[in-house]
């Protein structure tokens, strides 16, 4: 099961023990046009919705700058040219093939990764996934040179200003959804959750299910400053398998006696998958004046969606 859903043995033990659990809220996020804006900038649909109040060409240029930076980082630091045709739904998908070899002197340019997709090549791919996970944990501040960091910071601020703080507001809301003890609740397995968090009335976790391929999606998480709030183990690509399959894996993974799921996104696919799973769905709408956008969306609103499907828990904080 670990190969299919990413469930670790420790995680299974944590969720299957007989302890009394606080409520666990799992927020299942879409990325594009939800936590970040990119496609709507490139296609100018974001700016056009403002009826000439936004400079359309400026938005397109910002989108192109992001596109170039994402591709540059994918190729230069995350093996994308080598593994573009080997997309997996999550980084741990090939963990069983990783023999734990020391990779400090491993030459990734000479190991001849390619067809056939046999065990030997799966091991080479698993090595790359391990390095990608390590770089995600490092963060871009510890990988990129000074000039690239400066360009990245300026582009983020420029985009945030152009989109009326969409990026920073989405990130702040994601942090709010994480609960107060960010380090504890973002743990993949909850195995190291602190005593204070365990005794809390509610635990929270953010999971990302994106229709994009895995490596660019992980790079987007880093570039848009989401990596401290969404662990690499909580990023899923539905590119080949579809969102319903990813949602099913997530349901199996967080097999908790008192769990609630809520899907937040802008597209029909996550809406349809949420309906099949009977999970609440909050539809993000980037157009001005809409309540389900950033800034604008609040925990009180999301709590309403939770309560419609799951009922209102006795210990729910009315101030959410």
Image (spheres, grey):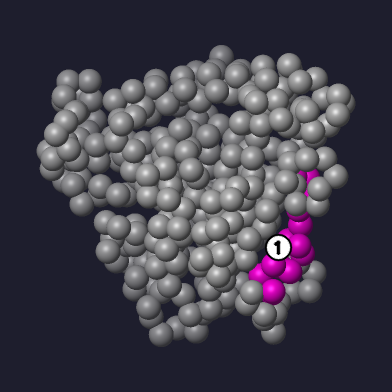
Residue depicted at 86% across the width and 24% down the height: 52
Q: Does 109 sit left or right of 150 as displayed?
A: left
- Give percent across and percent down for residue 20: 50, 84
Under circle 1, the secondary element is: helix
Examine the structure image and report whether residue 102 is included in the region drawn in magenta: no
Quadrant of res 306: bottom right
What span is colored magenta in the figure? 294-308
On the question of residue 100 being in view, the answer is no
Kindly report the secondary structure that dominates the magenta region of the rendered protein: helix
Residue depicted at 20% across the width and 23% down the height: 107
Residue depicted at 73% across the width and 16% down the height: 57
Q: Does 294 sit left or right of 66 as displayed?
A: right
Image quadrant for the N terminus? bottom left
Q: Nearer the viewer, residue 192 or 282?
A: 282
- Give percent across and percent down for residue 178: 61, 58
Which residue bears the numbered disc 1?
A: 302
On the question of residue 89 being in view, the answer is yes
């Amino acid at each position: 099961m670990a190969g299919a859903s990413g469930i670790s043995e420790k995680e299974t033990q944590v969720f299957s023990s007989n302890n009394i659990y606080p409520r666990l809220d799992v927020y299942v996020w879409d990325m594009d046009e939800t936590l970040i804006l990119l496609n709507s900038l490139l296609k100018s649909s974001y700016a056009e919705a403002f009826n000439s109040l936004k400079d359309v060409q400026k938005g397109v240029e910002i989108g192109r700058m992001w596109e170039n930076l994402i591709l540059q980082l994918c190729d230069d630091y995350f093996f994308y040219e080598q593994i573009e045709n080997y997309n997996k739904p999550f980084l741990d998908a090939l963990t069983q093939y990783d023999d734990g070899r020391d990779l400090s002197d491993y030459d990734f340019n000479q190991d001849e990764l390619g067809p056939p997709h046999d065990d030997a090549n799966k091991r080479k791919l698993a090595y790359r996934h391990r390095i990608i996970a390590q770089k995600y944990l490092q963060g871009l501040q510890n990988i990129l040179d000074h000039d690239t960091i400066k360009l990245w910071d300026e582009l983020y601020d420029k985009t945030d200003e152009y989109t009326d703080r969409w990026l920073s507001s989405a990130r702040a809301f994601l942090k709010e959804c994480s609960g107060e003890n960010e380090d504890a609740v973002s743990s993949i397995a909850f195995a190291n959750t602190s005593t204070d968090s365990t005794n809390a009335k509610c635990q929270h976790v953010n999971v990302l299910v994106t229709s994009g391929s895995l490596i660019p999606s992980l790079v987007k998480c880093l570039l848009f400053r989401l990596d401290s709030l969404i662990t690499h183990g909580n990023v899923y690509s539905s590119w080949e398998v579809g969102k319903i399959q990813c949602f099913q894996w997530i349901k199996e993974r967080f097999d908790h006696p008192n769990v609630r799921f809520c899907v937040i996104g802008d597209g029909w696919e996550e809406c349809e998958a949420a309906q099949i799973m009977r999970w609440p769905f909050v539809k993000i709408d980037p157009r001005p004046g809409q309540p389900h956008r950033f800034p604008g969306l609040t925990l009180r609103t999301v709590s309403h969606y939770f309560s419609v499907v799951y009922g209102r828990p006795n210990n729910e904080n009315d101030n959410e």
